[in-house]
Each structure stands twice: as C-alpha cells, then as structure tokens.
Amino acid sequence: MEQMILDGVRQFMTRIPFNQLLGVRLESLEMDRVALKIPMRDELVGNFLHGILHGGVITSVLDVAGGCVALTGAFSRIEGEPTKEQMAAISKLGTIDLRVDFLRPGRGEWFVATATPLRTGNKVAVTRMEFHNDQGELLAVGTGTYLCG
C-alpha cells in the first residue's frame, strides 16, 4: 500500500505546470522525506549582477517540497477510501503558512530541497524544509503549514 501512496504523490507532483516551469525534479520520495532537485538557469536569476538564484524560486521550491511531504501524509491518512473521496480530499491541499529564512546567496549549478513532516493531523500538516546548493551549503530553511483534509 505504501508504494501506491508514493506513486500517487509522484504522479500528482510531476503534473503541476509550475513545477515543470521551474524545472523541479523529484530526486527521492519516501513516506517521511522528499528531495527535489532544480538546475540553475538564467531565467531563475534574481540578482543579475551576481547571478544568484531568485529568493522567490527558493521559496517556491521549498513550498513544493513541503507540500509534497504533506501530501504523502494526507494520502496515508485516507488510505483505503474510495478514489473519488481521496481525490476530493487531496484537492483541498494548500499552503496555509510558509516561513523561509535565507542563510546564504543562491549560488550553484543545481540545488536540492528536502522536506520532512513535523506533524500530520486530520486537517493540517506542518513540515520542515532545507535548501542546499551543489556544494552542500545550506542556503535556506523553511517551515510550512498545509491544509490537508
């Protein structure tokens, strides 16, 4: 059953047009952890003088990672329900609150965002996210709260 949940989350996340626009790739997905990878591209530069990644891109990718791990928790909570009810519940998934702390400029060839659940309840999930560059430097951290039921 766990594999069905992971496959459903993988399918859901890869079909979101904004994720495709950013170039987000699902690197790994487990029930309690997700890792996303994004390549540096000229279109994602926020400070053209220094060639660093836009803070809005960092925030968006952290939000996608947090939402993905919240979705995993939501799917596992409604496991066994009919598909129609599952889709109705999942369609309510949304960000309630997002906090991001930027620690270093967004320099790198590629970046990885990871997320883990802090708590998944019947209605709300809270997640913790990190954003690293290709050198392993921690560039930003975040906490997200998601409506999931």
Image (cartoon, rainbow, N blue to C red):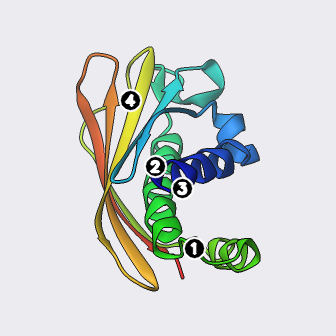
Q: Nearer the viewer, residue 63 or 140?
A: 63
Question: Could you tell me which secondary element the residue under label 2 belongs to?
Answer: helix
**Foreground: disc 2 or disc 4:** 2
Alpha carbon distance from label 3 to label 4? 33 Å
- Which residue is the site of mark 2? 65
Pointer 3: residues within 10 angstroms few (<14), some, or many (20+)?
Answer: many
Q: Spatial distance from mark 4 to mark 1, Cα to Cα?
A: 42 Å
Q: Residues within 10 Å of mark 4 (few under 14, many from 20)?
A: many
Q: Please report the residue visible at 64 percent of the width from the left and 77 percent of the height from the top.
A: 92
Rounded to the nearest whole Å, what is the CA distance between mark 2 and mark 1? Answer: 25 Å
- Residue at which label 3 appears: 5
Disc 2 from disc 4: Cα separation = 17 Å
Q: Percent x, y for residue 133?
A: 34, 24
The residue where tag 1 is placed is 80
> Label 4, on which residue?
106
Do labels 2 and 3 touch, CB within 8 Å? Answer: no
Q: Helix, strand or loop at disc 1?
A: loop
Left or right, 15 with respect to 33, comes to right
